[in-house]
Image (spheres, rainbow, N blue to C red):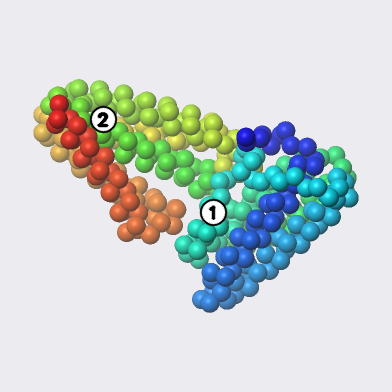
Amino acid sequence: MVKPFYELNEKELLALAISSEEEDSKIYGSFAEKVRGEFPATAQLLDSMQEQESDHRRRLIDMFQSRFGNKIPLIRRQDVKGFVRRRPIWLNRTLTLPQIRREVQTKESETTRFYERAIERTTDPEIRKLLGDLVEIERKHFAKEDEARRRLFVLQVVQPGLAGLMDGSVSTLAPVFAAAFATRNSWDAFLVGIAASVGAGISMGFAEALSDDGVLSGRGQPLLRGAVCGLMTTLGGIGHTLPFLIPNFYMATWVAIVVVAIELAVIAWIRNHYMDTPLLSAIFQVVLGGVLVFLAGIAIGSAG
């Protein structure tokens, strides 16, 4: 069961900090081994960060033992609501150097935010001092402020917007084109497309808003993310729905197909530009999914 951050007591906060530092230390170590041969300077920096995380963990353990004894409960990031979902360590070997740098910046930003929030929830002066010292150390890890701001923009706006655009553009293809080929009537297809787009937008908006309160992850206000996700979902569906305002069914269908191609190209570009997905891979993934859903809609509609 995921526990809200504000319900954690001082003992649980320290336990969470210990497990988080241990996890980050292992991740930085895996990053360092991956780039050591080709980028030795980056590997050396990651080794240094790994050592610092291990030192933080030792200091936190010493503080925990002095306050609460030797039995440290296992509390991890995934047990607390608000953290960014981390990719498994074994997937880190597939990351490129720019992706590794962005992953590190995201982790450091989240850790700094966590310690800042934890200070607000503890009254023990020694614990507050330790957490404050760790905040200052974590802040020094940021090498490029503009890159950190860009990463936050990706977390707060691009990710929910892209998720919505992909869902709206792809998931509504089947009902729109199924209705089009089943009825051969542009207006009927338009009504189905509008209903599917608005319904998907509402559903995705609520899902995004309720998934993360943004306190620790830094992903922004839930209502803002939900609004961005919901609006982009609706926009993604409406894009290939509007052509069916053209009375001529065949002309409307061809225009809608062109719009679908443009939508998929835009999604592939966003994934490449902001999410560091190789362009050919992004195109293949998006186009393959879109084409399969598109063909499914036509097949279902034609069967009727």
Q: Amino acid at mark 2?
A: Pro
Indicate the position of residue 204 as horizontal and vertical percent values: 43, 32
Inter-mark Cα distance, 1 to 2: 35 Å
Identity of the residue drawn at 59% across and 56% down: 105
Q: Earlier in the sequence, mark 1 or mark 2?
A: 1
Query: Which mark is drawn over residue 175?
Result: 2
Label 1 secondary element: loop
Q: Is residue 193 left or right of residue 210?
A: left
Question: Can you tell which quarter of the image residue 297 is in?
Answer: top left
Q: Is residue 187 left or right of residue 230?
A: left
Q: Is residue 200 left or right of residue 136?
A: left
- Residue nearest the viewer, comparing 220 with 9: 9
Label 2 secondary element: helix
Identity of the residue drawn at 69% across and 44% down: 75
Identify whether 269 is placed above or below 186: below
Question: Can you tell which quarter of the image residue 254 is in?
Answer: top left
Q: Amino acid at mark 1?
A: Pro
Q: Is residue 77 left or right of residue 67?
A: left
- Residue nearest the viewer, comparing 42 with 3: 3
Identity of the residue drawn at 44% across and 36% down: 229
Q: Which residue is mark 1?
A: 88
Indicate the position of residue 122 as horizontal and vertical percent values: 81, 40
Identity of the residue drawn at 34% across and 57% down: 281
- Residue nearest the viewer, comparing 103 with 302: 302
- Image quarter in which the N terminus is found: top right
Indicate the position of residue 243 as horizontal and vertical percent values: 20, 32
**Mark 1 Cα within 10 Å, few/some/many (few <14, many 20+)?**
few
